[in-house]
Image (spheres, rainbow, N blue to C red):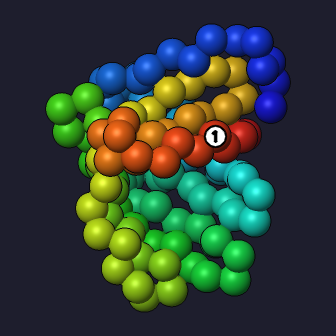
Amino acid sequence: MDDPTARWVRLDTERAFREAFADKRFAGEGFQFTIHADGRLTGQFGAARLDGRWHWRDGYFCRTASLDGEDLGLDCEIIEYRPGEMRYTRDKGAGERTVVAFG
């Protein structure tokens, strides 16, 4: 995590999102995932495999995913950026907030 004093910037266009995060590997405690430019999501959460698809809609990153075959459903998230990190807030900003490092 590069600079904890840097301000978070919301990414509200697909273009900005792709420029910042497409084909990058993200990591948090006990998990890692990749948001692929072709619309796929792949990764690991502990021993469980993550598979999914993503699209951009109305200023939100929206994804459908499964974790070891268990359907996680659709979630649309606010995406924010600062150097070396992404912060996503589930349920269009009303849900859980998570910060992940990327590289």
Vertical arrangement, residue 61 with respect to residue 2, above or below: below
Q: Residue at x 59, y 34 (%)?
A: 86
**On the picture, is 29 further left or further right than 78?**
right
Q: Quadrant of the N terminus?
A: top right
**Image: 85 above or below 62:** above
In the rendered image, is residue 22 in sight? no
- Residue 30 spot, x, y in % from top left: 75, 65
Residue projecting furthest to the left? 58
Q: Residue at x 77, y 58 (%)?
A: 29
**Residue sitting at 18 percent across and 32 percent down?**
58
Query: To which residue does mark 1 refer?
Result: 99
Between 47 and 89, the one nearer to me in the picture? 89
What's under tag 1, amino acid-wise?
A: Val
Q: Position of residue 55 (x, y in %)?
A: 28, 48
**Nearest the camera: 93 or 85?**
93
**Quarter of the image containing the C terminus?**
top right
In x, y percent, where is residue 93?
36, 36
Question: Looking at the image, which is closer to me, 100 or 96?
Answer: 96
Number of numbered discs overlaid on the protein picture: 1
Can the viewer see residue 29? yes
Task: Name the outermost residue toward the right.
Answer: 2
- Neighbour tally class for label 1: few under 14, some 14-19, many 20 plus, Cα within 10 Å: some
Q: Residue at x 48, y 48 (%)?
A: 96
Choose top left, top right, bottom left or bottom right for residue 18: top left
Classify mark 1: helix, strand or loop.
strand
Q: Could you tell whether 69 is left or right of 47 in the image? A: left
Left/right of residue 57 with respect to residue 62 in the rendered view: left
